[in-house]
Amino acid sequence: MTNSFTVREEVPPAGRWRWPVWAGYAACGWAALYGCALLAIAFDGGSLFGLPHGAWVAAPLLLATAVAAAATVRPWGRRLPRRAVSAAVWTAAVLALGSSAFVLLNLIELATTGTVRDRHGDGDWAGFIERGSFAVGAVLLVATALSWRHRTAGSCPRCGRAHSPWAVTALEHPAAHAASRRVRWIAYVGCAVFVPYYAVHGVHVAGYALDGSRFPPSGALTWSRWFLFGVLIALAVFLLLGLVRPWGMVFPRWTPWLAGRRVPRFLPLTPVWVVAPTLALYGLGGGIYTILAAAGIVGHYDTETLLLAAAAMTAFGGYGWALAITAVSYRLRTRPRCVPGPRDSVVPHRDLPSQPAETRPGAPRS
């Protein structure tokens, strides 16, 4: 395995890397506006996600998040403990991401049926908007946390090294190489977890239960849909393997007109971060519920239903977590390395990290 840098290209326009400047302001504005909106909803007797006191809990947390996001871009934030600000922003990002977990299911339902419904079959447009808002907030908060880390460390948002992002003349991209053996095995396990779930559905489509008895036919279970489901699983496996294999970094020979070109990082990472949170949290929550149901603590389900639920939660949760882990590995493996230009070419921005004094050429050392 190699990670040498061999592919060089001219540095993209500097404006593309101004996101550390505006991310904190955008996150602060989102949290403040949404927090005030939920506060008004709470005073009006409304709820959040159908929870009677959800708005009362979320409103002050969002207003506190707005303060934490503002601390990352305002001068007074430098007087606060760096780790405390970072912990506050990352905690808010995780909570926002968890609150948006099922927005993917809503988008799929909207695309296929033209509407969004809750588990009771009623319209759930309010819940869809709430989850979508938290998804936007999660993206802004992650960007804010990363910009705060780069700003306080004096590092470049492109490559993470200690130099000004404005003193760059070119980018060097790593040569195509596979992920570490541990990450590859995580990806392989994430692919294999679909096998039991797909097999159980195949047995049901054939008209049998897992114990060999006849399974009642259902219009939702047909051979054509079973094969279509297999195609979707194959696409999911393709995406996961692409995150750990060299052909996920450079288009292979079997891709006409693209062979040999570098794969844009956003191409695999965008669908990953849309899919992974929903599947990971859905599988985790559903798995816990299935365990409680099997123990007789909640609900009353037959063995066939519990086995199908266990296979489904293992497939969705296992794939979601494998996707998230391999995506982090892919992001780190494909990170470009900046080629700094002459010192005189540095044009610092007051809100972007500049090269620390102790790392500048000719700076006095202690």
Image: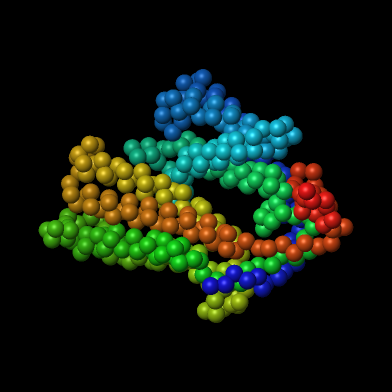
* Whether residue 291 can be seen here: yes
Question: Which residue occupies the foreground of this view, 133 or 13?
Answer: 13
The image quadrant of residue 202 is bottom left
Relative side of 218 to 117, left or right: left
Residue 263 position within the rendered picture, expressed as x and y whole percent measured from the top left: 59, 68
Question: Which residue occupies the foreground of this view, 49 or 317?
Answer: 317
Question: Which residue occupies the foreground of this view, 23 or 206?
Answer: 23
Residue 187 position within the rendered picture, expressed as x and y whole percent measured from the top left: 43, 63
Q: Is residue 359 above or below residue 151?
A: below
Residue 205 position within the rendered picture, expressed as x and y whole percent measured from the top left: 23, 62
Residue lying at the far left in this picture: please name it.
213
* Whether residue 346 can be seen here: no
Q: Is residue 181 above or below residue 360?
A: below
User: How many dots with numbers?
Assistant: 0
The image quadrant of residue 264 is bottom right
Q: How is the image coloured?
A: rainbow
Residue 326 position within the rendered picture, expressed as x and y whole percent measured from the top left: 48, 59
Q: Is residue 272 above or below residue 118?
A: below
| Residue in the image at 53% along x and 38% along y | 91
Residue lying at the far front in this picture: please name it.
366
| Residue in the image at 28% along x and 65% along y | 223
Relative side of 311 to 62, left or right: left
Question: Which residue occupies the foreground of this view, 211 or 357?
Answer: 357
| Residue in the image at 30% along x and 42% along y | 289
| Residue in the image at 43% along x and 57% along y | 322
